[in-house]
Amino acid sequence: MSLSRREFIRLLGLAGAAGMLPSSARAVRLTPSDLYEIPKFGNLTLLHITDTHAQLNPIYFREPSVNIGVGNALGKAPHLVGEPLLKHFGIAPGGPEAHALTYLDFAEGAERFGAVGGFAHLKTLVDRIRNERGPGNSLLLDGGDTWQGSATAYWTRGMDMVGACNLLGVEVMTGHWEFTYRDEEVIRNIGVFEGDFLAQNVAVREEALFDYRFAEFAGFDEDLGLAFAPYAIKEVGGVKVAIIGQAFPYTPIANPQRFIPDWTFGIQDARMQETVDKVRDGEKADLVVVLSHNGMDVDLKLASRVTGIDIIMGGHTHDGMPAPSLVTNSGGQTLVTNAGSNGKFLGVMDLEVKGGRLRDFRYRLLPVFSRLLEPHQGMLDYIESVRAPYRERLGEELAITEQTLYRRGNFNGTFDQLICDALRKVHDAQISLSPGFRWGTTVLPGQAITMDNVMDQTCISYPETYRREMSGAEIKAILEDVCDNLFNPDPYVQQGGDMVRVGGLNYVCDPTASIGERVQEMTLDDGNRIEPAKKYVVAGWATVGTQAPGEPIWETVATYLRDVKRVRIARLNTPKLKNVEGNPGIAHYPGRF
């Protein structure tokens, strides 16, 4: 049974009376009557969204039950799931925050608490907090992955989200999937965006500088060779705040470089240190904030190596963290946060800055429950206008699901398996491969799977499918390479996604092993062992190099769904895992240990 708004607030009150509401270091205890009533603290407030993935309307999004940490990350945030995560942050199970932050009893919780996110509801919450803090005392930051993830974003080339962010009041952003449009589209969109687009780690290739196509772009710095402005200085609450942008460092590796041929990326520790020193010493900034799309593990390492950063507000890995991690380095301490994904959370950082330095803070990660927040009418009207031309196509009901369909997790989720099964069936292949993206919304049991849902899972600017022969050795090399991106103990080698999803293929995985040794005992579904020299017919999509020749993946999945009509995933091709017993980043695993 679902909860009304009145019943929802009553549940919060009961939880507060029972002492169930969370308190963590420097976090504000919620008042029982209102999830969003946060007492004002300090002299300025930073509001943070990230990885909204173009989700304009409220959605469901199941958090992972598998987020394995290895090496120094073992047993530490963000590599905690379910009950260990709740225990670590002092959050009681069963309530709305536990539902927002974990996979536990997800379908039941989704029915009780309703959908999350939606820009109209987010707009109401942002406006409320900004009004409470007073004019000029807050700053709204967007960590990127905003222009991609829905059909309308794809069809408008991200412009629907630029308009939504302008209406929301975003003042600073950085990027990742933004760079999967053509470079001229990126420049055009930034020109329409009313805030600052920052990236201290994106340079123009030396060979392109001589006759650079975007030399007139306002953010281009010919002397530094940077494609975009590295930082911005904002006066907030009487405080001089420096915001430094850190775009996703592995964009040309994880996504097609052919779309952005003139730009180079990277972590750029040395340049980051120079930039921090410049805003500290030259600009006399009182507070230094890095708006990052590194992924949380990379941000934690960056915070240990670069001095002078007060706060890193991070994204990319979709980790909803209820409290910051505090990292000590040779120059002091840095707070590291990550604000989840899909518009599901708003990070609120209240700060006391005096005498040119950060003195104290309060942090709250607010789940955006659509049942508790009245939608902003202006944003509703905008969303309706954006989606109206596509409503009939997006609303097509393709099939009914009998179980929760989700993606998020280190290995196959049920929607991943659906995509893999569709590839094998429609393209007549023995094995299918699907990328380990962390975006993609959830569909609840009994709901219709619409074309909108399929596009949420597959909508990228390089969606073409392929069918080709690969040797067993080639397949293993692909799995080993992606596995190293995920489980290499050095965060600077990781790329922040999850393991490539497979269909028709089973294997053993040891996350603690070295590259070349993590993937073992590969077999087909019929039990036959994969032989290194033998050829197998493989179907897949999202090739990063040359464009694949086949139809867009959403057409493949739609064809499959129209045929099957009802979806019940009989088997997940998740690997058998080794050496992960007791790891708090894994629970209710559908494979074997």
Image (cartoon, helix red, strand yellow):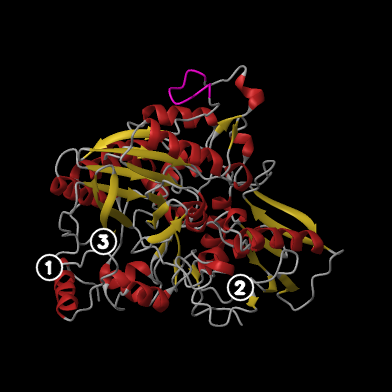
**Residue 294 image offset from top left, x and y in percent:** 50, 50
Query: Judging from the image, what secondary structure is the residue with disc 3 in?
Result: loop
Side of 368 where 394 appears, left or right: right
Q: Which residue is mark 3?
A: 369
Which three-letter amino acid code belongs to the residue tagged 2? Thr
Residue for badge 1: 33
Pinpoint residue 209: horizontal percent, then vertical percent.
Answer: 60, 21
**At 46% from the left edge and 55% from the top edge, which residue is drawn?**
329
Note whether residue 325 is visible: yes
Q: Nearer the viewer, residue 528 or 565?
A: 528
Q: Is residue 46 above or below residue 239?
A: below
The residue furthest right is 533
User: What amino acid is at disc 3?
Assistant: Phe
Tag 1: amino acid: Ser
Examine the rendered structure and indicate whether residue 166 appears above or below residue 441. above
What is the quadrant of the N terminus in the image? bottom left
In the picture, the quarter occupied by the C terminus is bottom right
Label 2: few (<14), some (14–19) or many (≥20) C-alpha neighbours in 10 Å: many
Q: Secondary structure at mark 1?
A: loop
Does any portion of residue 50 appear in the rendered image?
A: no
Give the percent coordinates (x, y) of residue 280: 38, 37
| Pointer 2 residue | 574
Q: On the image, which quarter does residue 483 sit in?
A: bottom right
Q: Is residue 218 magenta?
A: yes
First in sequence: mark 2 or mark 1?
1
Image side of residue 31 versus residue 576, left or right: left
Q: Are marks 2 and 1 in contact (CB under 8 Å)?
A: no
Residue range of the region highlighted in magenta in the rendering: 215-223
Mark nearest the camera among 3 and 1 is 1
Which of the 4 image quadrants contains residue 97? bottom left
Magenta span: chief secondary structure: loop
Q: Which one is nearer the viewer's eye here, 294 or 390?
A: 294
